[in-house]
Amino acid sequence: MSKNTKSTLEIERVGTTVNIKVPSTIGDQFNLPIEPLQDAEVLHVDMMELKIMISHGLRHFLMWFYGLEASNPTLKVHIKNVHTNVANTFVLVRKSINRYVNFDSVFVPFFCPRCSLDDVTTLMTREIFFADSNPVEKKIKPVICNKCGQPMELDATLGYFSLFENPS
Amino acid sequence: MTKTMVKDSPVRLLEIDQISSTGPSIEILNDVIGVCEDKDPQFILSQFLSRGILHMVQRSSLAFDTEVEFAKLMLRDPDCFVNFPISSILKPLSAGGDMEIALTSIRAKCHSKADCNSAVDIIVNELPPGTSQGLITEIKIAALELISNALIHGPKKEIDGLSYDQNGREIFNNRHVMVKPAFLSVGYDEERIVVACRDLYGNLEIAETLERVRRCFEYGVSLMMNFGPEGAGVGTFLIFKLASAIYISVAENGLTVICFSVPRQLSQTGRDALSKNLHVHYKRPPIASAKVNGTT
C-alpha cells in the first residue's frame, strides 16, 4: 500500500483498486492522475471535501474522465459523497460522463418553506435510490427544520438523481 | 460613458411572443423594453441576439415592476447603472449615491486572479442573515465566475502572452505585472440579493458571450465545453442559470459592469423555476462596430 499527497490529492492504492480523495479546492495546479491508473481495475473518488466547484473545476474533471476513458476504458470509476452544488454541475454533463462514471452517493438538499432554511447533510446512495419504486422522500428519514421543528421538503427534482442512471 | 440616444425619447413596452425568424440583428433597439411571460432562457437570449432588444422583462419574473423601471432607467441614464448598480437595480426610482451606500453591504477590490477567492469570501460574509446555505454556495460560485472572468479574460485580451505563476500571480515576459483591479460588491433589499462586478477593461464581447450561453442552454454544456484557452461560456452559463436577472453594461475599452440578482427566500427548485430577465447596455453597438471595423 502506498500513500501519495502530490497535486493536493490523496491517492491510495490497494492492489488494483485506487482510492482518491479530492481536496476542497481545485486550482490551476490541480492535476488529476491518468498514468498511475492505467493498470487499475477500480477507482473510488471521494468528494466529501469538495463543497464548491466552478466551471474551471468541471473542465478539469471532464478532461480527467475523458483521459481515463481513453487510456483505461475498462476501469470502473465510482464517485461518492458529492455535495449538492457539485452534483448540480455534474448533472449538466451527465450524458457525457455517465457511460463511464458511476455516482454512488450524493447529498440531497432539503428546504423549509416556512423558515427559508435549508439542510444539505442527508446522503442518498445509489443502492437506496434503486431499492424500490417509492418516491425519494419515502426512502430517506424525514429531515426536521431546526427552527420550526416541522419536516422539511425535498429541494431537488428528479433530474438531480439522474446522476445515478447509467445509459444502457 | 455616453448617454443613450433615447434620453428624451419615450420608451416602448413591446409584447414579445415569438423569436424573430431573421438572422442576427443589425439594429439595436434603444427605445424598447421587451415584455413576455414564462419564456425559457434561450428565448430571452435570442430576443437580444436576433432582434437587438436590450431589455427583456418577464411578467412571471421576480419584481416585474421594478425590473421595468430599471430598464427605463438604463435606457434613459445608463451612467446611473454604471456608477450605482445596486441601487439602480433594487430602487431604480431613487437610485444614486446615497441609496447606493445605504444598500451596499460591502465592496471588495481584487488585484490579481490569485485573490479571487478572498474577494468572494469578503462579499459572501456580508450576505443577509438567514440566507440559506445552498444560496450562499450558489452566490459564491457565480461571484467567483464573475471575478475570475474579469481578472482573466479582461487582461488576457489586452496583454498578449500573459501567464501565471504557481500562486496564480500574473506574469508577462518572465516578470510579475500588475493588472487593472476588479471590484465586487453585494447589496440586498427584502426580496432580492444583488452581486455586482466591475472591471476596467471594457472588452467583454457581449453578443459572443451571450451566444455561447444560449448554445449551452440549447445544446448542453458537454457539447459546448472545449478544452482550449478560450472559455466556452460555461461560467457565464452557470451565472445565468442561477440568476433571476442579469445586467450587463460595457463601455468599450473602458469599463464592464455585470450584475446578477437572486431571490432571497426561495428554495433551489423555486429559484430554478423562475423566469429570467436580461438587461444589456453598450457604449457602442457591437454588431455595427464590427461592421465598421470590417470595412476599414
Image: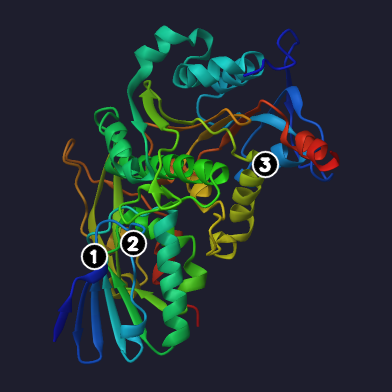
Residue bearing mark 2: A29
- Identify the mark at residue A8; answer none if there is no mark: 1
The amino acid pointed to by label 3 is Ala
Q: Are marks 1 and 3 in contact (CB under 8 Å)?
A: no
Secondary structure at numbered mark 1? helix
Which residue is more in the foreground, B285 or B173?
B173
Whole-percent x, y for residue B79 in the image: 58, 16
Q: Locate residue A34, reporting x and y percent.
A: 37, 80
**Same subunit, tags 3 and 2:** no
**Disc 1 vs disc 3: which is toward the camera?**
1
Number of numbered discs: 3
- What colouring style does the render use? rainbow
Residue type of the residue flagged with mark 2: Gln
Q: Quadrant of residue B28?
A: top right
Residue located 84% across and 38% down the image? B296
Give SS at disc 2: loop
| A152 displayed left or right of B268 | left
Q: Which numbered disc covers residue B207?
A: 3
Q: Label 1 to label 2, Cα distance in Å?
A: 9 Å
Label 3 crowd bin: few (<14), some (14–19), many (20+), radius 10 Å: some
As displayed, is residue B202 above or below residue A47?
Answer: above
Indicate whether B119 appears above or below A106. above
Crowding at mark 1 (Cα within 10 Å: few <14, some 14-19, many 20+): some
- B121 and B289: which one is in front? B289
**Image mark 3: chain:** B
SS assignment at label 3 = helix
Please identify the quarter of the rendering in which residue B49 is found.
top right
In which chain is the residue bearing label 2? Answer: A
Q: At x 36% / y 58%, what residue is drawn?
A: A28
Q: Nearer the viewer, mark 3 or mark 2?
A: 2
Which residue is drawn at the image coordinates 25% and 57% (left, top)?
A: A24
